[in-house]
Image (cartoon, helix red, strand yellow):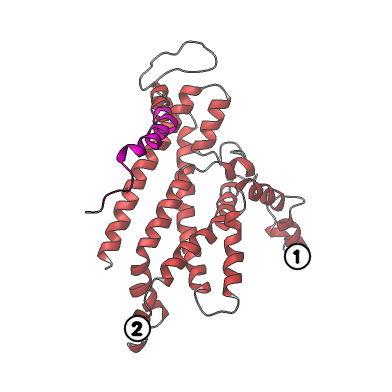
């Protein structure tokens, strides 16, 4: 039996630090979500589920925040996975300078979100933005839009920018999965006369399920806690059209309504646990049945 090089009590320091910095603040946040904590009073009273009743009330806009958060999460998972898989399949082939292509595609993933947001806020400007200016220059004026202020386009524009930034990161994970597939499977498929779509369905996708599970969970957790790209591009506007849970939390704390803010954070925390659990369970089951 292999024994650890260090005694177990060596981990107590890390455990204590984790408890102080993460566990205790998290539990305190859950507690404060059941109180009327605010900047307007020095007293804090326990009010039970009142904050959660407010959050789930049809009279408030919080349900729209949840809907937008879930919509953003689902859309980015689908588009990033599909585009990332397409890019991984392309750069996995024997093309010239494929390492350069991989680096260029991956580059947006390492650019800070704040920088990406500021760049695209300028690119998507309705009057002086590069996108509309280009469309007008080539005679496609009718395609020029108010990308970040139109009620029908603002949220879709945010999703498009986020997919542009994150697809390269998903590509790298799926590319690693593709390169782990033994060549003998492809050789056997070639002998049987299988075309690309047969290989994709019966070889690539089943053997990529572990990597797809990883990317799905990562995209799920990222999508549920998205904040910075929305804040930089639209700050939740126009109106409440692009508000998500974290921008709601930010604004509630800015207004001094700490009880409501922590209640929204608790709802988000529960979403991440429940949806993450079922996503892993479902994807793991798909992985097992594909073998």
Residue 19 vs residue 225, the one in the foreground: 19
* Image vertical order of residue 233 relative to residue 99, above or below: above
Residue 237 pos. (x, y %) = 61, 39
User: Residue shown at 56%/30% (left/top)?
Assistant: 251
Secondary structure at badge 2 equals helix
User: What quarter of the picture does the N terminus occupy?
Assistant: bottom left
Please say whether residue 71 is visible from this viewpoint.
no
* Image vertical order of residue 3 relative to residue 62, above or below: below
User: What quarter of the picture does the C terminus occupy?
Assistant: bottom left
User: Residue shown at 52%/59% (left/top)?
Assistant: 169
Relative horizontal placement of residue 262, taking residue 275 as reference (left or right): right
User: Residue shown at 36%/84% (left/top)?
Assistant: 187
Q: Quadrant of residue 109?
A: bottom right
Secondary structure at badge 1 equals loop
Identify the residue position indicated by label 2 in the image. Answer: 189
Residue 147 vs residue 251, the one in the foreground: 251
Residue 51 vs residue 12, the one in the foreground: 12
Please identify the residue farthest to the left as the structure is shown: 1
- Callout in the foreground (2, 1): 2
Q: Is residue 14 within the magenta segment?
A: yes
Residue 202 pos. (x, y %) = 33, 74
**Other residues around mark 1 within 10 Å, as few (<14) / some (14–19) / many (≥20):** few
**Other residues around mark 2 within 10 Å, as few (<14) / some (14–19) / many (≥20):** some
User: Residue shown at 50%/32% (left/top)?
Assistant: 61
The magenta segment? 3-25
Identify the residue position indicated by label 1 in the image. Answer: 139
Q: Is residue 253 within the magenta segment?
A: no
Q: Main secondary structure of the magenta part?
A: helix
The disc at residue 147 is none
Q: Quadrant of residue 77?
A: bottom left
């Amino acid at each position: 039996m292999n024994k650890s090089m260090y005694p177990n009590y060596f981990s107590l320091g890390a455990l204590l630090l984790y408890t102080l910095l993460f566990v205790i603040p998290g539990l305190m946040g859950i507690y404060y979500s059941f109180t009327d904590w605010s900047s307007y009073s020095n007293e804090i009273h326990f009010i039970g589920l009142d904050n959660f009743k407010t959050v789930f009330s049809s009279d408030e806009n919080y349900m729209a925040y949840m809907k937008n958060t879930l919509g953003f999460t689902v859309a980015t998972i689908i588009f990033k996975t599909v585009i990332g898989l397409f890019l991984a399949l392309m750069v996995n082939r024997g093309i010239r300078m494929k390492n350069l292509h991989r680096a260029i595609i991956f580059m947006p993933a390492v650019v800070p979100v704040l920088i990406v947001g500021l760049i695209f806020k300028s690119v998507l400007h309705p009057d002086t933005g590069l996108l509309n200016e280009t469309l007008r220059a080539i005679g496609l004026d009718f395609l020029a839009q108010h990308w970040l202020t139109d009620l029908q386009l603002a949220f879709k524009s945010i999703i498009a920018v986020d997919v542009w930034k994150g697809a390269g990161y998903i590509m790298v994970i799926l590319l690693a999965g593709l390169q782990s597939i033994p060549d003998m499977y492809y050789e056997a498929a070639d002998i049987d006369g299988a075309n690309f779509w047969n290989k994709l369905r019966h070889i690539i996708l089943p053997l990529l399920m572990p990597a797809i599970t990883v990317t799905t969970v990562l995209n799920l957790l990222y999508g549920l806690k998205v904040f910075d790209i929305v804040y930089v591009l639209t700050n939740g506007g126009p109106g409440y059209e692009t508000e998500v849970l974290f921008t709601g939390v930010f604004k509630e704390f800015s207004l001094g309504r700490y009880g409501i803010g922590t209640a929204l954070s608790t709802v988000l925390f529960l979403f991440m646990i429940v949806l993450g659990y079922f996503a892993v369970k479902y994807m793991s089951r798909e992985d097992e049945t594909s073998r």
